[in-house]
Image: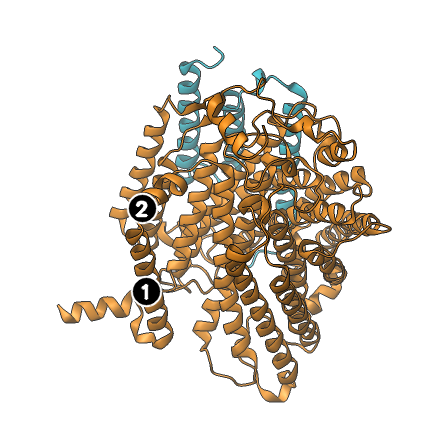
Chain colours: A orange, B cyan
């Protein structure tokens, strides 16, 4: 009995690996106990179920996405700090090779798929329906399904750390290394299934927001009157719909190789590992634009608002968004120029890659021209937007260097590349999402985040960023390759690596300031009583903060771009105030437990497949089928909010 | 006929049959490699048509402009991905 327990602990809980695992186990256990105890003590289980787990309200789903993204930013950030600690000195043995492999794999996967993706989805959910004058997304139930698939996919991926072992073949997980023969054990299966489950949710989100934007706009809001953030979501949704299936196929085939004995990507029996690389980047390159375009959209809103000017060149902003989303499909080979596909192929994809700089450049100049002669306020969202411009410009310039195929043979997989993509993804996506979070935070919660702590966070994170990544460009030129866990002293990489590590710690301190800022502001943050704390331009700022669950008591009629700004200038803001005579009962979707249960079922099924345990695998899939069948026969899934309730809510908000 | 159950059932059955035939051909290697690939591509084309006609209702949409634009974009991306992947793979990139 004791022997069996020890065996279990060593095989699945990896207790022989030492304090890092024991510490994580203890922390996870304490957190779980803490959450359960708090919920039980304050009798909040019912509240949790009714208000959050079963909600189909886009605003609450957006908030849950954002919390998940911040938690994953923490986890991915801890991975980054561990890596930088290991690399700080030559010949260091803080981590061993196997741990280092696992940590860079989970860092990359988490940051892209479980941090950047939920962060953009958070803003999609919170902002888009409010900006286009809608009461919810086109498919609220599907929206909840998307969230719970993301949530349980991320949970499945993260649990690998303490149960069975983390994936360790890199976030790109190329075969043949990621095939069963060279990488046995559950780690890679966790990677494949975790991403696959959350990927289904991502495709559904793309479809949902495409339909929402095309079909649910308020009367009078033509496409060319749409706010630019909504335009960026439209572009990102189109890319999600066309790009994610390639990832789904690549991961599914690799999973079949690993658990069903097929040979799609093996070295033997006619398998072709390079086809995985090809499929992965058919998704992978559009993916980076999927995460960065919403950031561009957020910057467009913020720059216009805080310069108190209309955005410069709206038409060219729209066309460059659409152009980027099309060109992004024709650049994927630049991730593997060195595969040796020949000069014709490499030349085509090199030129296409460089062409992306043109519409992106148009956007950067438009932001600068919007600021030109504007009355700029340096509030937190604008600070991050301004910091983004030089950061992204350098990242873009080094991107064009990497796009030169012959030169790429030098830079490929060196720290030059690492510095480049961190500069575009942090400078673009993270800065953009943080700017968007600060900007729309009052709309979500009814208070602003504290300015003083936010400035500390901003300067630590920004200074830290350059201290961390500028040395890495040089290290790349000096020959340092990505994914090496140790290097000898005589190569002379020590000093720059130490500087880089110091920068990473500074960024970590910046993140802690953001945490402190959120905690402090919950009590002491400036309350937003007007619903329009930044003197905004678009429809969401015409609503009170936080927004009532039905959003608009009366659907507005749109006659101009920047509708709210125009009304304020003309002194006609009461046009958007509801009139008691016009109020009608409001149709809203009912909450449902099915999306959460579908997520749980997928989690159980995924867990079964990870270990080739067929009982939970089949049980989980049956659970999914049962939930779908149950939902198919739910005809009574809407209710109507009576006029009296709408009127009471609006009166309590002082709008009637 | 617009949204009748019969149409869905026929479409569902057709897609299952097409999948089963393709899978069977590949598994049993009933044909030489060249003709086999051709047969699989033809079956895949039929599958696309079945999906578009029976499930996505291409012939009965309300906004034709909208629909056909999306469809054209989809075809552009599909052909770009498939043909360019073949192009990329022809340049001695086979590792095996």
- The N terminus of chain A sits in image quarter: bottom left
Mark before the other along the chain sequence, 1 or 2: 1
**Residue at mark 1:** A30
Query: Split into 4 quadrants, where in the image is the C terminus of chain A?
Result: top right
In the image, what residue occupies the spot 48% across and 42% down? A61
Q: Residue at x 33, y 50 (%)?
A: A609
In percent of width and height, residue A113 lies at 52, 53
Q: Which mark is residue A274?
A: none
| Badge count | 2
Q: Position of residue A55 (x, y in %)?
A: 42, 38
Mark 2: secondary structure: helix
Task: Kindly indicate the quadrant of the structure image that contains residue A239.
Answer: top right
Left or right: B11 as drawn, with respect to A207: left
Q: Quadrant of residue A10?
A: bottom left
- Work out whether residue A475 can be spotted: yes
Residue at mark 1: chain: A
Q: Disc 1 or disc 2, which is closer to the eye?
A: 2
Under circle 1, the secondary element is helix
Q: Is residue A524 above or below residue A482?
A: above
């Amino acid at each position: 009995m004791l022997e069996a327990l020890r065996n279990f602990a060593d095989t699945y809980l990896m207790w022989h690996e030492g304090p890092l695992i024991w510490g994580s186990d203890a922390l996870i256990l304490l957190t779980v106990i803490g959450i359960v105890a708090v919920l039980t003590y304050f009798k909040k289980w019912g509240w949790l179920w009714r208000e959050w787990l079963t909600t189909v309200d886009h605003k609450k789903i957006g908030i849950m996405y954002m919390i998940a993204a911040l938690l994953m930013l923490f986890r991915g950030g801890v991975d980054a700090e561990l890596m930088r600690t290991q690399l700080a000195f030559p010949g260091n043995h803080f981590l061993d090779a196997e741990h280092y492999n696992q940590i860079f794999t989970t860092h990359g996967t988490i940051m892209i798929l479980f941090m950047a993706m939920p962060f953009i989805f958070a803003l999609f959910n919170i902002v888009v329906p409010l900006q286009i004058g809608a009461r919810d997304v086109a498919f609220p139930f599907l929206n909840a399904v998307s969230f719970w698939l993301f949530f349980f996919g991320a949970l499945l991926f993260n649990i690998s750390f303490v149960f069975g072992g983390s994936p360790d073949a890199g976030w790109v997980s190329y075969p043949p290394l990621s095939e069963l023969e060279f990488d046995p054990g559950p780690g890679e299966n966790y990677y494949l299934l975790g991403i696959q489950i959350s990927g289904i949710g991502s495709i559904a989100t793309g479809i949902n927001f495409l339909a929402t934007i095309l079909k649910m706009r308020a009367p009078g809001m033509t496409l060319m009157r749409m706010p630019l953030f909504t335009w960026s979501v439209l572009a990102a949704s189109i890319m999600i719909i066309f790009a994610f299936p390639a990832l789904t196929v690549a991961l599914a085939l690799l999973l079949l190789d690993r658990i069903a004995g097929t040979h799609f990507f093996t070295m033997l029996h006619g398998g072709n590992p390079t086809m995985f690389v090809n499929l992965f980047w058919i998704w992978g390159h559009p993916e980076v634009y999927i995460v960065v375009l919403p950031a561009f959209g957020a910057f467009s809103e913020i720059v216009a608002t805080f310069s108190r000017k209309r955005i410069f060149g709206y038409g060219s902003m729209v066309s460059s968004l659409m152009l980027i989303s099309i060109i992004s499909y024709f650049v994927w080979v630049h991730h593997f120029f060195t595969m040796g596909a020949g000069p014709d192929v490499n030349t085509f994809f090199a030129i296409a890659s460089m062409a992306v700089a043109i519409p992106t450049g148009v956007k950067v100049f438009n932001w600068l021209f919007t600021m030109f002669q504007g009355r700029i306020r340096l509030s937190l969202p604008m600070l991050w937007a301004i910091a983004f411009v030089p950061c992204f410009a350098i990242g873009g310039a080094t991107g064009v260097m990497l796009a030169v195929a012959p030169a790429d043979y030098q830079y490929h997989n060196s720290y030059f590349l690492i510095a480049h993509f961190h500069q575009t993804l942090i400078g673009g996506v993270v800065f953009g999402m943080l700017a968007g979070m600060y900007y729309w935070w009052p709309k979500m919660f009814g208070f602003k985040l504290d300015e003083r702590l936010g400035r500390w966070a901003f300067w630590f994170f920004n200074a830290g960023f350059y201290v961390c990544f500028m040395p890495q460009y040089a290290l790349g030129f000096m020959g340092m390759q990505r994914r090496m866990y140790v290097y000898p002293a005589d190569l002379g990489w020590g000093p720059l690596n130490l500087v880089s590590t110091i920068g990473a710690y500074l960024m970590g301190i910046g993140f802690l300031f953001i945490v402190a800022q959120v905690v402090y502001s919950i009590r002491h943050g400036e309350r937003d009583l007007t619903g329009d704390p930044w003197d905004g331009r678009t429809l969401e700022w015409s609503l009170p903060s936080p927004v009532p669950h039905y959003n608009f008591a009366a659907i507005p009629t749109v006659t101009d771009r920047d509708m709210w700004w125009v009304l304020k200038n003309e002194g006609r803001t009461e046009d958007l105030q509801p009139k008691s005579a016009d109020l009608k009962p409001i149709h809203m979707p009912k909450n449902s437990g099915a999306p959460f249960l579908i997520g749980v079922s997928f989690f159980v099924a995924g867990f079964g497949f990870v270990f080739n345990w067929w009982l939970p695998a089949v049980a989980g899939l049956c659970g999914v089928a049962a939930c779908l069948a149950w939902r198919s026969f739910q005809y009574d899934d809407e209710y109507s909010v009576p006029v009296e309730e709408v009127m009471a809510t609006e009166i309590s908000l002082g709008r009637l | 006929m617009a949204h009748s159950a019969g149409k869905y059932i026929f479409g569902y059955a057709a897609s299952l049959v097409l999948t089963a035939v393709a899978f069977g051909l590949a598994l049993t290697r009933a044909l030489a490699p060249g003709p086999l690939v051709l047969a699989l591509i033809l079956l895949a084309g039929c599958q696309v048509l079945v999906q578009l006609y029976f499930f996505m209702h291409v012939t009965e949409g309300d906004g034709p402009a909208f629909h056909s634009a999306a469809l054209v974009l989809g075809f552009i991306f599909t052909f770009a991905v498939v043909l360019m992947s073949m192009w990329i793979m022809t340049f001695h990139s086979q590792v095996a």
